[in-house]
Image: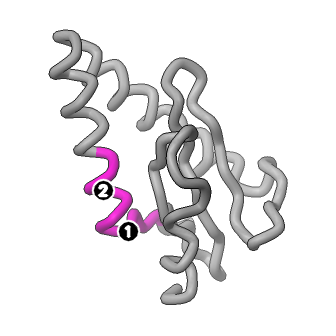
Amino acid sequence: MTLVVLEQAEKEFSKSAGYYEFKEAGLGIRFRNEVAAAVNWIQEHPEIPRMRLRGYRRVNLRVFSHYVAYVIRGSTLWVVAIAHAHQRPEFWIRRMAKL
């Protein structure tokens, strides 16, 4: 399965990693590693997380209050958001219309 990370999701990821690194040295690296582990798990098990009402799946990070939202279209896995769980819910949902 091909993995594609939307540019907006990349920006969210970088912004959050920078924030955590600013808060405490090394924390941004831990965030990056946890996101990488979640994305790797998603690639290996894309169908396991339940389908949400709006047609996407999500994996919550274990340590950080973020989640990885993604959709599967054919043989492509699209990461549409790497979002903070306590901010505007599904603020990114319109991104899916372009896939």
Dividing the picture into quadrants, the one containing residue 4 is bottom left
Q: Residue furthest front?
A: 88
Task: Using a 10 Å C-alpha cutoff, classify the residue at mark 2 as few (fewer than 14 neighbours), some (14 to 19) or many (20 or more).
Answer: some
| Residue 72 or residue 69, whichever sits in front | 69
Q: Decide if residue 64 is on the left or right side of residue 18.
A: right
Name the residue type under label 1. Leu
The residue located at (54%, 48%) in the rendering is: 68
Q: Which mark is residue 10?
A: 2
Name the residue type under label 2. Glu
Question: Is residue 12 found inside the magenta-colored segment of the image?
Answer: yes
Q: Which residues are magenta?
A: 3-13
The residue located at (66%, 50%) in the rendering is: 58
Q: Decide if residue 41 is on the left or right side of residue 82.
A: right
The residue located at (53%, 18%) in the rendering is: 63
Question: What secondary structure prevails in the magenta region?
Answer: helix
| Residue 98 or residue 4, whichever sits in front | 98
The vertical placement of 85 against 6, above or below, is above
Q: Decide if residue 66 is on the left or right side of residue 28.
A: right
Question: Is residue 9 found inside the magenta-colored segment of the image?
Answer: yes
The vertical placement of 29 against 86, above or below, is above
